[in-house]
Image: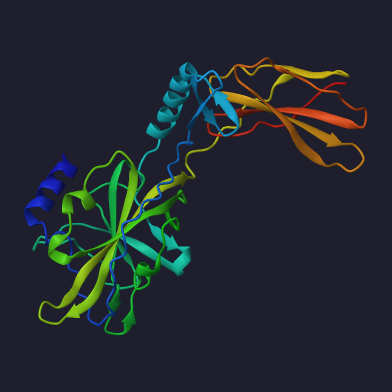
Amino acid sequence: MKQIYTMVTALVLCAALFFVMDPLADNSAFEKPPTEKNSAPVQTKIETVAKEEDKAVDKIAEFPVLPAQREKLDALQRQRQESIKGMDPARIEIPSIKAKAVIEATGILKNGEMGVPEDVDEVGWFEPGFKVGAKGHAVLAGHVDSLTGPAIFYDLKKMKIGETVILTDRDGREMVFQVTEMVSYETDEAPIEEIFGSSGKRMINLITCIGDFNRKIGSHEERLVVSAELVSDSATKEKEPEPPTNVKATSSNISWYAVRDDAIIGYRIYEEDKKTGEIKKIDTVSLFDRKKVELQTSPDKRYFVTSVDVDLNESKKAQATQ
């Protein structure tokens, strides 16, 4: 209800909610960059390929996946995504522009504007909206400049698609977001619902002023919105899959027992040179293939097999008995 109330208020107050940063120094004009998208979701990318018999199969990394398996794997990944909970951010770091700041929770002022920190070197998080890392657009705003010079988001316009934003909470939980889009708007033309509203993805919007400073209105004429999508969360620990068992190497093949885990998508086979210690991957086996590879083994080599899950986590190497 709190978020619904906030959105209704945002729509009614529209231009006011898209906060007036009230910077006090001139800033050079900013040319609108073209809208670009380079989404990097947490979910493993699955591409479709065609087999020789023209039957469509899926492929995750080097492992073919049958359509029926794809449904189960998608469900597992959705379950993992749903387990991610949002957080109250305490600090922000943007490595590419060397920006670090404390985050202050802000709300809606009596005049209907979004509150921003008095300290121009801090960043405001719109607390009545979405938590950082939750599905939706969490909004963080920062000043571009002040009477004394550049402020925390002065170089935000220099960011590029694909660069990262790191947010942490008071307990040390860290989330990394990747920039997917940079768009500038005239102050009274900003799409409020899109910027502050819901989304099926876990997004943040960083906002600051850009463009010429208009002394008549006491503000810059444009707003820059940098959108970024969650790509990693330290609270979501990747579980290492179990390694295969009963791994055996004969003079003509290597075999093993399958791992009983619905998330497993395949196996990798490695060989190690006993003299040099060099290890290299020599083969892969998909989930639905026989758990055996035919090859001529060597007494000068050691052989290992690992299991790989849908998130491309790999197990410890299980050494073959020879």
Q: Residue 320: image x %, image y %? A: 81, 23
Q: Is residue 86 left or right of residue 307?
A: left
Q: Is residue 299 visible?
A: yes
Q: Residue 184: image x %, image y %? A: 25, 64
Q: Residue furthest bottom?
A: 148
Depicted 133 relative to depicted 292: above or below: below
Coloration of the structure image: rainbow
Depicted 62 relative to depicted 29: above or below: above
Residue at the spot x=77%, y=28% of the render? 304
Q: Residue 45: image x %, image y %? A: 48, 36
Q: Of residues 226 and 66, which is closer to you in this image?
A: 66
Q: Of residues 280 and 203, which is closer to you in this image?
A: 280
Q: Of residues 183 and 105, which is closer to you in this image?
A: 183
Could you tell me which quadrant the N terminus lies in? Answer: top left
Depicted 322 relative to depicted 77: above or below: above
Residue at the spot x=17%, y=66% of the render? 186
Could you tell me which quadrant the C terminus lies in? Answer: top right
Residue at the spot x=31%, y=57% of the render? 35
Q: Is residue 278 left or right of residue 29?
A: right
Q: Residue furthest left?
A: 12
Q: Is residue 247 visible?
A: no
Q: Residue 111: image x %, image y %? A: 8, 63
Residue at the spot x=36%, y=45% of the render? 133
